[in-house]
Amino acid sequence: MAELLAARDNATHGDMVEVRLDGVADLDVAGVLQGRRVPVVVTCRPTWEGGQFEGSEDSRSRILDRALEGGAEFVDVEWRALSQSTSAGFAEVIRRDPVRVVVSSHDFDGVPADLDDRVRAMRSLGAGAIKVAVMASRLTDTLPLKRIAAEGDAIVIGMGEAGVPSRLLAAHYGSRWTYAGNAVAPGQMPAERMADDFHFFRVEPTTRIFGVVGTSALHSLSPVMHNAAFEAAGIDAVYVPLRAASFEDFLSYASAMGVEGVSVTIPFKLDALRAASRSSSLTQSVGAANTLRRDGEGWEATNTDVEGFLAPLDAVFGARLRGARAAVLGAGGAARAVVAALVARGSLVTVYARRSEQAQDVARSFGTDHGVWPPSPGSWDVLVNCTPVGGAGRRGESPLSREDVAGPLVYDLTYGTGPSALLRDAREAGCLTIDGLPMLIAQAERQFEWWTGQRPEPGVMADALRRRINVSAETDTRATETRRHGVHS
């Protein structure tokens, strides 16, 4: 109880707190409600619905009934509990005060085939609200939730990474509220991050939607930058991660939700160009797009990676790029932009990829050379890592062995907390180094201007990114200390 009450009172970013009574050893229902600062939803979730309560259904219904009697603003009753032979107690909970009862359904396996029938059955019970949570494997899995919420009585949630937009865009889905927390449920994120990084409390049904689409969109730092820039410019817009199962999945979702523009990342940069009805000549020459915007004629594509890549490189290497030997690691959309930029600067480019046919294809497109993986030490003046190795979740990995890192400059397009393994090896070898953050900022500034017609406030994106990285570093440190002392939360 002491831990539960402390957690309740420390949840200061929300309008309401869900208090989970399952798993509390010394439960005192009246004590849960005393001294609360904000309204509460009282839940006592059984093991068969993903919770920890192992007692009888009769005792569980009595707990919820006592919570209603004690003045809880809402209690949550599982729809499946109401369909069982022991449901009399739960039906009585609804009869006591239906307005304060939420009938909920959670499907951790996907979107049930009988979803519409299930929703009708839930509504027929007479509770004041229903809650429908489904596991989303695709962005489009969340679209039925918007239809369900249209009647105004539903809380709808897409669980999992693909379901995150349903939480951040709850106002667009029509959900009565949504849930934040420290990953208690799949895809859930802390309330502080929803408020600070995604400006959740300012998002209305009319707020314009932008985002980053990719298979690792949740690890992107782009939302921090773009949302800060929208706020500084006074633009009513939000930028969210869109974890798509395929590019067709994104296109269908974007059409249904009215998404106006996106940053495009691995592995969809070639798909983005193919999907566009119009594109700049630079984008066509690169053969990949990292940015889309939509108008009445469909999607238009551009590529801000070229300018974004060159901005920090010009600052440290400048005129030395002409005639410099450049080794490019990778053969995806980012690599194509890098090769185009280096060729434009007069560098002698060689493309390397673990799959030699991909390296040959990129090299052929730009009239450059390809080499056998890995590049030999001393064979390059500038080495650029365009592979995902070293990115989020892989900072300790390097695309090259330490012995292969030897040359004047190493540019790693990945970014994260602290230097990547490749950059650490490069610094030990005496190389100049650049990580992916300056490029990320430079290309994002150009995206913002292309979408909005105005430049972002000077330094606003860099400052927001710096704050976010510092917070992440502090969080990592605290997590390390917590593990060291054997404390878990």
Image (spheres, helix red, strand yellow):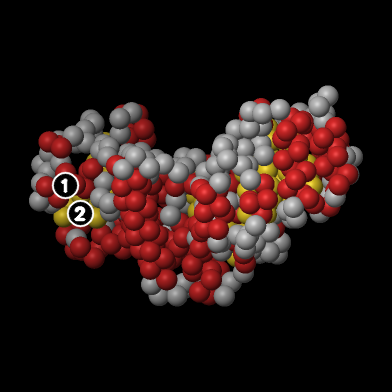
Which residue corresponds to the image point at 30% horizontal and 30% vertical from the top-left?
354
The answer to which quarter of the image holds residue 125 is: top right
Q: Secondary structure at mark 1?
A: helix
Percent coordinates x, y for residue 215 in the rendering:
49, 40
Check residue 278 in the rendering and tell me which mark sits there, or answer none: none
Percent coordinates x, y for residue 293 in the rendering:
58, 58
Which residue corresponds to the image point at 49% horizontal and 67% vertical from the top-left?
228
Work out whether residue 124 can be spotted: yes
Q: Earlier in the sequence, mark 1 or mark 2?
A: 1
Percent coordinates x, y for residue 190 in the rendering:
52, 52
Q: Quadrant of the C terminus?
A: top left
Work out whether residue 284 can be spotted: no
Q: Is residue 476 or residue 310 the one in the foreground?
A: 476
Residue 78 appears left or right of 117: left
Q: Which residue is mark 2?
A: 433
Q: Are marks 1 and 2 in contact (CB under 8 Å)?
A: yes
Task: Give the amino acid type for the residue marked by disc 1 in the picture.
Answer: Ala
Q: Are there few (<14), some (14-19), or many (20+) residues within 10 Å of tag 1?
A: many
Q: Is residue 247 or residue 24 the one in the foreground?
A: 24
Q: Are there few (<14), some (14-19), or many (20+) residues within 10 Å of tag 2?
A: many
Percent coordinates x, y for residue 81 in the rendering:
77, 31
Task: Give the amino acid type for the residue marked by disc 2 in the picture.
Answer: Thr
Q: Is residue 121 or residue 431 the one in the foreground?
A: 121
Q: Secondary structure at mark 2?
A: strand
Q: Which residue is mark 1?
A: 426
Which residue corresponds to the image point at 27% horizontal and 51% vertical from the top-left?
418
Q: Is residue 202 or residue 191 the one in the foreground?
A: 191
Which residue corresponds to the image point at 76% horizontal and 36% vertical from the top-left?
61
> From mark 1 to mark 2, how far is it between C-alphas?
7 Å
